[in-house]
Amino acid sequence: MRKELGAGIFSLNFKIAKIPHEDVVKGLQLFQEKVLPHVRNL
């Protein structure tokens, strides 16, 4: 993907409204564990 897009840095935005802090932390942890390993070396 890096080659195709010509970019090495991706910015992700999370909209966090009235979500309990624990749920936000859990969501970020899941993103780190489940998503990042698949996109880290693209």
Image: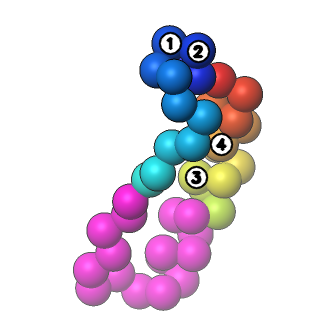
Q: Where in the figure is residue 10, as x and y percent of width and height? A: 51, 43
Q: Earlier in the sequence, mark 4 or mark 1?
A: 1
Q: Is residue 25 magenta?
A: yes
5 shown above or below 26: above
Disc 3 secondary structure class: helix
- In this figure, which residue is indicated by the disc labeled 2? 3
The C terminus: image quadrant: top right
Q: Which residues are magenta?
A: 13-28
Q: Where in the figure is residue 9, as x and y percent of width and height? A: 57, 42
- In this figure, which residue is indicated by the disc labeled 4? 36
- In this figure, which residue is indicated by the disc labeled 3? 31
**Mark 1: which amino acid?**
Glu
Distance from label 4 to label 1 (Cα)?
Answer: 19 Å
Distance from label 3 to label 4 (Cα)?
Answer: 6 Å
Disc 1 secondary structure class: helix
Distance from label 1 to label 2 (Cα)?
Answer: 4 Å
Q: Earlier in the sequence, mark 2 or mark 4?
A: 2
Q: Is residue 21 magenta?
A: yes
Q: Are marks 4 and 1 in contact (CB under 8 Å)?
A: no
User: Residue 25 falls in which quadrant of the image?
Assistant: bottom right
Q: Are marks 3 and 4 in contact (CB under 8 Å)?
A: yes
Q: Are marks 1 and 2 in contact (CB under 8 Å)?
A: yes
Q: Earlier in the sequence, mark 2 or mark 3?
A: 2
Question: Can residue 35 be seen by looking at this rendering?
Answer: no
Q: Give 4 or 27, whichever is nearer the viewer.
A: 4
Q: Earlier in the sequence, mark 1 or mark 3?
A: 1
- In this figure, which residue is indicated by the disc labeled 1? 4
Q: Where in the figure is residue 15, as x and y percent of width and height? A: 31, 68
